[in-house]
Image (cartoon, rainbow, N blue to C red):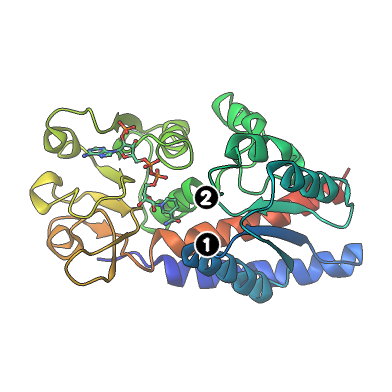
Amino acid sequence: MRISGKDLSSRLKEEMAVKVAGLKEKYGREPHLAVILVGEDPGSVSYVTGKAKASEVVGIKNTTIRRSVDISEGELLDLIGTLNRDDSIDGILVQLPLPSHIDENKVIETISKEKDVDGFHPLNVAALWQKRPCTVACTPKGIIKLLREAGEDIAGKRAVVVGRSNIVGLPVAKLLLDANATVTIAHSKTVDLGSVTRQADILVVAVGRPHTITADMVKPGAVVIDVGVNRNPDTGKLCGDVDTEAVEAVARCITPVPGGVGPMTITCLMENTIEAFERKMQL
Ligand code: NDP
Protein backbone atom coordinates (compact mmCIF):
# COMPACT_ATOMS: atom_id res chain seq x y z
CA MET A 1 0.00 0.00 0.00
CA ARG A 2 1.20 3.52 -0.74
CA ILE A 3 0.73 6.37 1.71
CA SER A 4 0.00 9.44 -0.37
CA GLY A 5 1.64 12.56 0.98
CA LYS A 6 -0.16 14.42 -1.77
CA ASP A 7 -3.62 13.43 -0.50
CA LEU A 8 -2.74 14.02 3.15
CA SER A 9 -1.28 17.43 2.22
CA SER A 10 -4.44 18.43 0.37
CA ARG A 11 -6.56 17.52 3.37
CA LEU A 12 -4.32 19.34 5.84
CA LYS A 13 -4.15 22.43 3.63
CA GLU A 14 -7.94 22.54 3.42
CA GLU A 15 -8.11 22.44 7.23
CA MET A 16 -5.45 25.15 7.47
CA ALA A 17 -7.35 27.37 5.01
CA VAL A 18 -10.36 27.29 7.35
CA LYS A 19 -8.11 28.09 10.31
CA VAL A 20 -6.35 30.96 8.50
CA ALA A 21 -9.71 32.49 7.54
CA GLY A 22 -10.62 32.47 11.25
CA LEU A 23 -7.28 33.98 12.24
CA LYS A 24 -7.69 36.75 9.67
CA GLU A 25 -11.09 37.53 11.10
CA LYS A 26 -9.74 37.56 14.64
CA TYR A 27 -6.48 39.47 14.12
CA GLY A 28 -7.25 41.58 11.04
CA ARG A 29 -4.58 40.07 8.82
CA GLU A 30 -3.33 36.73 7.55
CA PRO A 31 0.03 35.10 8.41
CA HIS A 32 2.83 36.41 6.18
CA LEU A 33 5.74 34.31 4.89
CA ALA A 34 8.78 35.93 3.25
CA VAL A 35 10.85 33.65 1.01
CA ILE A 36 14.26 34.75 -0.24
CA LEU A 37 15.52 33.17 -3.46
CA VAL A 38 19.13 33.83 -4.45
CA GLY A 39 19.99 33.07 -8.08
CA GLU A 40 18.01 31.06 -10.59
CA ASP A 41 18.83 27.41 -9.90
CA PRO A 42 15.87 25.53 -11.50
CA GLY A 43 15.45 23.22 -8.48
CA SER A 44 15.29 26.17 -6.09
CA VAL A 45 12.93 28.10 -8.38
CA SER A 46 10.60 25.10 -8.46
CA TYR A 47 10.65 24.71 -4.63
CA VAL A 48 9.95 28.43 -4.15
CA THR A 49 7.10 28.29 -6.66
CA GLY A 50 5.64 25.29 -4.78
CA LYS A 51 5.78 27.27 -1.54
CA ALA A 52 4.02 30.25 -3.14
CA LYS A 53 1.27 27.98 -4.54
CA ALA A 54 0.71 26.26 -1.19
CA SER A 55 0.54 29.67 0.53
CA GLU A 56 -2.18 30.70 -1.90
CA VAL A 57 -4.21 27.55 -1.18
CA VAL A 58 -3.92 28.03 2.58
CA GLY A 59 -4.54 31.80 2.44
CA ILE A 60 -1.13 32.82 3.74
CA LYS A 61 0.44 35.98 2.31
CA ASN A 62 3.63 35.01 0.50
CA THR A 63 6.28 37.51 -0.53
CA THR A 64 9.04 36.01 -2.63
CA ILE A 65 12.12 38.23 -2.70
CA ARG A 66 14.50 37.44 -5.56
CA ARG A 67 18.15 38.46 -5.46
CA SER A 68 20.88 37.89 -8.02
CA VAL A 69 23.43 35.13 -7.53
CA ASP A 70 26.19 37.68 -6.86
CA ILE A 71 24.51 39.28 -3.84
CA SER A 72 27.16 39.63 -1.13
CA GLU A 73 26.86 37.80 2.18
CA GLY A 74 26.60 41.16 3.97
CA GLU A 75 23.75 42.33 1.73
CA LEU A 76 21.84 39.10 2.31
CA LEU A 77 22.32 39.31 6.09
CA ASP A 78 21.16 42.97 6.00
CA LEU A 79 18.04 41.93 4.08
CA ILE A 80 17.27 39.25 6.69
CA GLY A 81 17.80 41.82 9.45
CA THR A 82 15.25 44.11 7.81
CA LEU A 83 12.72 41.25 7.58
CA ASN A 84 13.41 40.30 11.23
CA ARG A 85 12.44 43.83 12.28
CA ASP A 86 9.36 43.99 10.03
CA ASP A 87 6.39 43.38 12.28
CA SER A 88 4.14 42.44 9.36
CA ILE A 89 6.26 39.35 8.58
CA ASP A 90 5.78 36.18 10.63
CA GLY A 91 8.03 33.67 8.87
CA ILE A 92 11.29 33.98 6.95
CA LEU A 93 12.79 31.28 4.76
CA VAL A 94 15.97 31.49 2.71
CA GLN A 95 15.92 28.86 -0.04
CA LEU A 96 18.97 26.59 0.20
CA PRO A 97 21.48 25.83 -1.20
CA LEU A 98 23.14 29.26 -1.44
CA PRO A 99 26.07 30.22 -3.68
CA SER A 100 29.41 29.09 -2.22
CA HIS A 101 30.57 32.64 -1.31
CA ILE A 102 27.76 32.82 1.28
CA ASP A 103 28.06 31.02 4.63
CA GLU A 104 24.75 29.13 5.04
CA ASN A 105 25.24 28.75 8.78
CA LYS A 106 25.57 32.52 9.20
CA VAL A 107 22.37 33.00 7.18
CA ILE A 108 20.45 30.45 9.25
CA GLU A 109 21.67 32.00 12.50
CA THR A 110 20.68 35.51 11.38
CA ILE A 111 17.01 34.66 10.89
CA SER A 112 15.33 35.34 14.23
CA LYS A 113 14.41 32.15 16.10
CA GLU A 114 10.76 33.26 16.24
CA LYS A 115 10.56 33.69 12.43
CA ASP A 116 12.60 30.57 11.60
CA VAL A 117 9.78 28.56 10.02
CA ASP A 118 12.27 26.05 8.57
CA GLY A 119 13.28 25.03 12.10
CA PHE A 120 16.99 25.22 11.21
CA HIS A 121 18.08 27.91 13.71
CA PRO A 122 20.52 26.47 16.31
CA LEU A 123 18.21 27.58 19.12
CA ASN A 124 15.30 25.66 17.59
CA VAL A 125 17.52 22.62 17.01
CA ALA A 126 18.81 22.77 20.59
CA ALA A 127 15.27 23.12 21.95
CA LEU A 128 14.20 20.02 19.99
CA TRP A 129 17.01 17.98 21.58
CA GLN A 130 16.11 19.35 25.01
CA LYS A 131 12.40 18.51 24.54
CA ARG A 132 11.47 22.18 24.86
CA PRO A 133 8.94 24.10 22.74
CA CYS A 134 10.40 24.80 19.30
CA THR A 135 9.75 24.98 15.60
CA VAL A 136 10.33 21.49 14.23
CA ALA A 137 11.98 21.20 10.79
CA CYS A 138 9.38 20.65 8.06
CA THR A 139 10.52 17.35 6.52
CA PRO A 140 10.88 15.45 9.84
CA LYS A 141 7.54 16.86 11.02
CA GLY A 142 5.91 15.72 7.77
CA ILE A 143 7.39 12.23 8.13
CA ILE A 144 5.81 11.76 11.57
CA LYS A 145 2.45 12.88 10.16
CA LEU A 146 2.80 10.31 7.34
CA LEU A 147 3.50 7.55 9.87
CA ARG A 148 0.39 8.53 11.83
CA GLU A 149 -1.58 8.58 8.57
CA ALA A 150 -0.38 5.02 7.94
CA GLY A 151 -1.93 4.09 11.29
CA GLU A 152 1.49 3.30 12.72
CA ASP A 153 1.72 3.23 16.49
CA ILE A 154 5.33 4.37 16.87
CA ALA A 155 5.74 3.59 20.57
CA GLY A 156 7.76 0.44 21.18
CA LYS A 157 8.60 -0.04 17.51
CA ARG A 158 12.08 -0.55 16.17
CA ALA A 159 12.90 2.37 13.86
CA VAL A 160 15.91 2.64 11.59
CA VAL A 161 16.83 5.99 10.02
CA VAL A 162 19.33 5.79 7.17
CA GLY A 163 21.11 9.17 6.95
CA ARG A 164 22.22 11.55 9.68
CA SER A 165 21.99 15.05 8.18
CA ASN A 166 21.00 18.00 10.36
CA ILE A 167 17.90 18.69 8.29
CA VAL A 168 16.45 15.18 7.92
CA GLY A 169 18.14 12.15 9.50
CA LEU A 170 19.00 13.48 12.95
CA PRO A 171 15.75 15.36 13.67
CA VAL A 172 13.62 12.43 12.38
CA ALA A 173 15.51 10.09 14.68
CA LYS A 174 14.89 12.45 17.61
CA LEU A 175 11.15 12.73 16.85
CA LEU A 176 10.88 8.93 16.62
CA LEU A 177 12.73 8.60 19.92
CA ASP A 178 10.38 11.15 21.53
CA ALA A 179 7.48 9.02 20.26
CA ASN A 180 9.07 6.09 22.16
CA ALA A 181 10.48 4.09 19.25
CA THR A 182 13.82 2.34 19.72
CA VAL A 183 15.96 4.10 17.16
CA THR A 184 19.06 3.14 15.19
CA ILE A 185 20.78 5.63 12.89
CA ALA A 186 22.67 4.20 9.91
CA HIS A 187 25.06 6.18 7.67
CA SER A 188 27.73 5.83 5.01
CA LYS A 189 30.11 4.02 7.37
CA THR A 190 27.50 1.47 8.47
CA VAL A 191 28.75 -2.03 7.72
CA ASP A 192 26.17 -4.37 6.16
CA LEU A 193 23.31 -1.89 5.91
CA GLY A 194 20.81 -4.66 5.07
CA SER A 195 21.38 -6.42 8.39
CA VAL A 196 20.41 -3.18 10.15
CA THR A 197 17.44 -2.20 7.95
CA ARG A 198 15.94 -5.71 8.09
CA GLN A 199 15.29 -5.15 11.81
CA ALA A 200 13.17 -2.06 11.21
CA ASP A 201 9.42 -1.91 11.79
CA ILE A 202 9.75 1.70 10.63
CA LEU A 203 12.39 2.44 8.00
CA VAL A 204 13.16 6.06 7.07
CA VAL A 205 15.64 6.49 4.23
CA ALA A 206 17.27 9.89 3.61
CA VAL A 207 20.43 9.30 1.63
CA GLY A 208 20.07 10.81 -1.85
CA ARG A 209 21.03 7.75 -3.90
CA PRO A 210 18.70 5.56 -6.00
CA HIS A 211 18.51 1.83 -5.14
CA THR A 212 19.91 2.33 -1.62
CA ILE A 213 17.15 0.07 -0.29
CA THR A 214 16.22 -3.06 -2.21
CA ALA A 215 13.40 -5.47 -1.33
CA ASP A 216 15.72 -7.94 0.43
CA MET A 217 16.71 -5.17 2.89
CA VAL A 218 13.17 -4.68 4.22
CA LYS A 219 11.43 -6.58 7.01
CA PRO A 220 8.05 -7.98 5.86
CA GLY A 221 5.25 -5.71 7.10
CA ALA A 222 7.50 -2.70 7.72
CA VAL A 223 6.47 0.91 7.04
CA VAL A 224 8.96 2.54 4.68
CA ILE A 225 9.38 6.30 4.31
CA ASP A 226 11.42 7.27 1.27
CA VAL A 227 12.80 10.79 1.67
CA GLY A 228 15.30 10.73 -1.20
CA VAL A 229 14.85 12.91 -4.25
CA ASN A 230 16.97 11.73 -7.16
CA ARG A 231 16.94 11.45 -10.93
CA ASN A 232 16.81 7.89 -12.20
CA PRO A 233 20.03 7.61 -14.22
CA ASP A 234 18.29 5.41 -16.84
CA THR A 235 14.97 7.22 -17.31
CA GLY A 236 15.77 10.73 -16.06
CA LYS A 237 12.57 10.57 -13.98
CA LEU A 238 12.31 11.61 -10.34
CA CYS A 239 12.89 8.71 -7.95
CA GLY A 240 13.62 8.06 -4.30
CA ASP A 241 16.26 6.04 -2.47
CA VAL A 242 14.06 2.93 -2.30
CA ASP A 243 13.12 0.46 -5.05
CA THR A 244 9.46 1.35 -4.67
CA GLU A 245 7.73 -1.39 -6.63
CA ALA A 246 9.82 -4.27 -5.30
CA VAL A 247 9.69 -3.00 -1.71
CA GLU A 248 5.94 -2.39 -1.93
CA ALA A 249 5.47 -6.16 -2.25
CA VAL A 250 7.24 -6.71 1.10
CA ALA A 251 6.34 -3.64 3.14
CA ARG A 252 2.97 -2.86 4.74
CA CYS A 253 3.16 0.76 3.52
CA ILE A 254 5.55 2.88 1.52
CA THR A 255 5.66 6.55 0.53
CA PRO A 256 6.09 7.16 -3.21
CA VAL A 257 8.50 9.60 -4.84
CA PRO A 258 7.19 11.96 -6.06
CA GLY A 259 4.01 12.49 -4.02
CA GLY A 260 5.19 11.26 -0.60
CA VAL A 261 7.40 13.25 1.75
CA GLY A 262 7.88 16.20 -0.67
CA PRO A 263 4.33 17.64 -0.46
CA MET A 264 4.33 17.11 3.32
CA THR A 265 7.45 19.26 3.69
CA ILE A 266 5.71 22.24 2.09
CA THR A 267 2.51 21.61 4.06
CA CYS A 268 4.45 21.60 7.33
CA LEU A 269 6.07 24.88 6.29
CA MET A 270 2.55 26.32 6.06
CA GLU A 271 1.77 24.90 9.50
CA ASN A 272 4.97 26.36 10.98
CA THR A 273 4.14 29.79 9.53
CA ILE A 274 0.65 29.71 11.03
CA GLU A 275 2.11 28.65 14.39
CA ALA A 276 4.68 31.50 14.28
CA PHE A 277 1.84 33.94 13.55
CA GLU A 278 -0.29 32.63 16.40
CA ARG A 279 2.61 32.76 18.87
CA LYS A 280 3.24 36.39 17.93
CA MET A 281 -0.40 37.40 18.15
CA GLN A 282 -0.84 35.73 21.53
CA LEU A 283 2.12 37.57 23.11
P1 NDP B 1 22.88 14.60 3.05
O1 NDP B 1 23.74 14.41 1.83
O2 NDP B 1 23.12 15.75 3.93
O3 NDP B 1 22.95 13.27 3.93
C1 NDP B 1 22.95 12.01 3.36
C2 NDP B 1 23.14 10.98 4.44
O4 NDP B 1 23.16 9.70 3.82
C3 NDP B 1 24.46 11.12 5.20
O5 NDP B 1 24.21 11.01 6.58
C4 NDP B 1 25.30 9.96 4.68
O6 NDP B 1 26.16 9.40 5.67
C5 NDP B 1 24.23 8.96 4.34
N1 NDP B 1 24.71 8.02 3.34
C6 NDP B 1 25.36 8.27 2.19
N2 NDP B 1 25.65 7.13 1.52
C7 NDP B 1 25.16 6.13 2.30
C8 NDP B 1 25.16 4.72 2.17
N3 NDP B 1 25.70 4.12 1.11
N4 NDP B 1 24.59 3.99 3.14
C9 NDP B 1 24.02 4.58 4.21
N5 NDP B 1 24.01 5.92 4.38
C10 NDP B 1 24.56 6.68 3.44
O7 NDP B 1 21.39 14.58 2.49
P2 NDP B 1 20.01 15.15 3.12
O8 NDP B 1 19.76 14.52 4.42
O9 NDP B 1 19.99 16.61 3.02
O10 NDP B 1 18.98 14.59 2.05
C11 NDP B 1 18.85 13.21 1.80
C12 NDP B 1 17.91 13.02 0.63
O11 NDP B 1 16.63 13.51 0.98
C13 NDP B 1 18.30 13.77 -0.64
O12 NDP B 1 17.92 13.01 -1.76
C14 NDP B 1 17.48 15.03 -0.58
O13 NDP B 1 17.22 15.58 -1.86
C15 NDP B 1 16.21 14.50 0.05
N6 NDP B 1 15.41 15.50 0.74
C16 NDP B 1 14.08 15.49 0.48
C17 NDP B 1 13.26 16.40 1.10
C18 NDP B 1 11.81 16.36 0.80
O14 NDP B 1 11.10 17.25 1.20
N7 NDP B 1 11.32 15.34 0.12
C19 NDP B 1 13.78 17.40 2.04
C20 NDP B 1 15.19 17.26 2.32
C21 NDP B 1 15.97 16.34 1.66
P3 NDP B 1 27.39 10.19 6.33
O15 NDP B 1 26.80 11.06 7.38
O16 NDP B 1 28.24 9.12 6.88
O17 NDP B 1 28.04 10.97 5.23
Number of residue marks: 2
Query: Quarter for ligand 1?
Result: top left
In what element is the residue under mark 2?
loop
What x and y, as percent, mark residue 6?
A: 44, 70
Front residue of 157/272: it is 272
Front residue of 21/266: it is 266
Q: Residue at the spot x=51%, y=57% of the render?
A: 265
Q: Residue at the spot x=41%, y=58% of the render?
A: 261
Instruction: Please identify the quarter of the rendering in which residue 183 is found.
Output: top left
**Outermost residue toward the left?**
216
What x and y, as percent, mark residue 246?
A: 12, 61
Q: Which residue is mark 2?
A: 97
**Outermost residue toward the front?**
70
**Amino acid under disc 1:** Ser
Q: Which residue is mark 1?
A: 44
Q: Does the rendering let one see residue 134?
A: no
Q: Residue at the spot x=25%, y=50% of the render?
A: 209
In what element is the residue under mark 1?
helix
Q: Note whether 55 is above or below 188 in the view shown.
A: below
Disc 1/disc 2 C-alpha distance (Å) = 8 Å
What x and y, as percent, mark residue 62?
A: 73, 67
**Amino acid under disc 2:** Pro
Instruction: Please identify the quarter of the rendering in which residue 191 is found.
Output: top left
Position of 243 with respect to 102 (left or right) is left
Residues marked 1 and 2 touching at CB (< 8 Å): yes
Q: Note whether 268 is above or below 193 in the view shown.
A: below
Q: Crowding at label 2, few (<14), some or many (≥20) Cα neighbours within 10 Å?
A: few
**Outermost residue toward the top?**
130
